[in-house]
């Protein structure tokens, strides 16, 4: 299984280059199935087009529009393979048997029935599948899996077809200790555990779609992230057991930044049982996804405290409207909204057994004058919220503090990083 991201097929010349790579793989005696993303920034351009036509495009139609991007790349890639003398057949997600639920814009794969792909393989053809899309089992409408979802298409198909492994081709030489566009001294990792990469991708590192990692872990798909612009070995996803038996035992695997969240503070909340439950029940019912939450006990005899949480900026309006509607019920003083925040996350399986990780991180932040506004942790992750304007600087400082800097400058082969 091979998946080529948008940056690998950005123009006609790149499509031909990728076609050659696929043909070479096939000629070495491998069976190969390909998943492809939309060319370059096509998906962003289609979204911009939709917004010009309609301020709030219907979800069903937006999905239909966006899947067109992948239809273009699958067809031209098949043509390029034909010109190199092999047979390729393109398939939409629906034709390839990617069955999803009916949630437009972030559908979940519920079944994979790749009969047509198996048939094409048995007839010696190379199937080229449009990534990021499927068809709803209940409504029969075309769905998309969320931005970056072609990775998930590839892993789901790899699992269903029992592929030996799934190669994710992108514009950098694997998974790095930090986004190489931000930290020039980041270095590629030979291996990373599923758990670690899940924490990185769920916290803003867009190198892999987080659903893809969940899926790969659950169905034990071997994933190799690498560049389509070089022949360098990339990064293999491994289990914790494989990590323990291996050589590489770094405490920290990487650092990620996420600028997609906003911070909401409810000022002057009465400090009594049931208040938090009421607030967060209402927020949940409004469909807002909460990430971090911070609350203190009331100071002195005021009997009031502040409750702060983060949520995606895209849900900010919903959260504020919802809270306004229960203002009298809760009896809080006011609301504060701040979308100029960044969440920076340090990830590493070795954190569990090494004290002092948080102290080093806080010291690195202090040295560049970055204030820490919120903190949250998991077993293998430490996240802090700070100002968005200093995020890149903070990521670099943390990268240096944990001795991850490389002597060589990281290469970004292509792409706009959109
Ligand atoms: P594709 O078009 O192949 O899907 P993406 O743009 O979705 O590529 O993902 C690749 C990009 O992910 C890289 O160019 C890089 O800027 C970004 N990235 C963020 N964090 C990391 C990381 N830790 N390691 C590698 N790349 C990262
Ligand atoms: N083309 C889609 C996107 O840009 C899916 C993908 O690239 O994985 O999000
Ligand atoms: Mg991607």
Image (cartoon, rainbow, N blue to C red):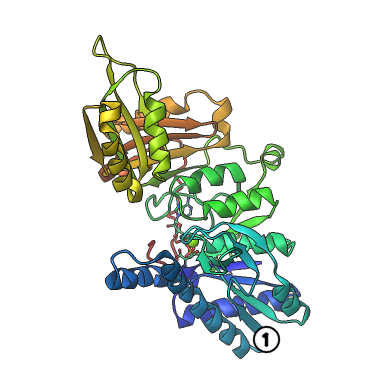
Q: Position of residue 409 (x, y in %)?
A: 42, 54
Q: Examine the rendered structure and indicate whether residue 224 appears above or below residue 130.
A: above
Which residue appears at 32% of the width and 28% of the height?
Answer: 307
**Residue furthest top in the image:** 301
Q: Is mark 1 within 8 Å of ligand 1?
A: no
- Front position in the image: 7 or 343: 343
Quadrant of the drawing holding the N terminus: bottom right
Residue for point 61% across, 80% down: 90
In the current view of this chain or complex, which residue is farthest to the front? Answer: 329
Q: Where residue 49 sits: x, y (%)?
A: 32, 73
Task: Out of 356 and 145, give the one closest to the viewer.
Answer: 145
Specify whether 52 is left or right of 129: left
Answer with the quarter of the image where residue 161 lies.
Answer: bottom right
Residue 59 picture location, percent across and down: 42, 64
Residue bearing mark 1: 86
Query: Measured along the vertical axis of the image, is residue 253 above or below residue 40?
Result: above
Tell me, yes or no, if residue 214 can be seen here: yes
- The residue lying at 77 percent from left, 82 percent from top is 123
Q: State how many labels appear.
A: 1
Evaluate whether residue 361 shows in this view: no
Of all residues, the one furthest to the left in this rendering is: 333
Residue 32 vertical position relative to residue 332 in the rendered view, above or below: below
Left or right side of 190 for 229: left
Quadrant of the drawing holding the C terminus? bottom left
Near-viewer residue (302 or 188): 302
Q: Residues within 10 Å of mark 1 (few under 14, many from 20)?
A: some
**Secondary structure under the numbered disc 1 in the rendered image:** loop
Given the current orientation, which residue lies at the most extreme right position? 122
Image position of 175 (left or right of 370): right
């Amino acid at each position: 299984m091979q998946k080529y991201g948008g940056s690998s097929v950005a123009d006609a010349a790149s499509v031909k280059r990728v076609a050659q790579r696929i043909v070479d793989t096939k000629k070495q005696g491998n069976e190969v199935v390909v998943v492809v993303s939309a060319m370059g920034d096509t998906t962003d351009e289609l979204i911009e087009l939709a917004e010009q036509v309609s301020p709030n495009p219907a979800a069903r139609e937006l999905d239909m529009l966006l899947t067109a991007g992948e239809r273009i790349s699958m067809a031209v890639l098949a043509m390029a393979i034909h010109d190199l003398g092999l047979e390729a057949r393109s398939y939409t997600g629906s034709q390839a048997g990617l069955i999803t639920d009916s949630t437009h814009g972030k559908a979940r794969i519920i079944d994979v029935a790749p009969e047509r792909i198996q048939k094409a393989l048995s007839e010696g053809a190379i199937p080229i599948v449009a990534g990021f899309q499927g068809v709803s089992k209940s409504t029969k409408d075309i769905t998309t899996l969320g931005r970056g979802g072609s990775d998930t298409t590839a892993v789901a198909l790899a699992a269903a077809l029992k592929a030996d492994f799934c190669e994710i081709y992108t514009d950098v030489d694997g998974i790095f200790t930090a986004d190489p566009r931000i930290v020039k001294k980041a270095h590629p990792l030979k291996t990373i555990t599923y758990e670690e990469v899940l924490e990185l991708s769920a916290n803003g590192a867009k190198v892999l779609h987080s659903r893809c990692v969940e899926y790969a872990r659950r169905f034990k798909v071997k994933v190799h992230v690498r560049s389509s612009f070089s022949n360098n070995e990339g990064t293999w996803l491994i289990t914790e057991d494989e990590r323990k038996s291996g050589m590489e035992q770094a405490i920290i695997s990487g650092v990620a930044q996420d600028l997609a969240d906003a911070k909401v503070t409810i000022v002057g909340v009465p400090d009594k049982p049931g208040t938090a439950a009421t607030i967060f029940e209402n927020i949940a019912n409004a469909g807002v996804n909460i990430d971090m939450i911070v609350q203190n006990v009331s100071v002195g005899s005021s009997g009031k405290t502040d409750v702060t949480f983060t949520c995606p900026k895209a849900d900010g309006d919903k959260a504020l409207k919802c809270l306004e509607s229960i203002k009298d019920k809760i009896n809080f003083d006011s609301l504060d909204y701040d979308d100029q925040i960044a969440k920076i996350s340090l990830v590493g399986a070795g954190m569990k057994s090494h004290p002092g990780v948080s102290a080093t991180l806080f010291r690195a932040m202090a040295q560049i004058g970055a204030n820490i506004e919120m903190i949250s942790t998991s077993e293998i992750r430490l996240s802090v919220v700070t100002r968005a304007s200093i995020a890149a600087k903070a990521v670099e400082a943390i990268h240096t503090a944990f001795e991850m800097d490389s002597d060589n400058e990281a290469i970004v082969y292509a792409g706009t990083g959109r």
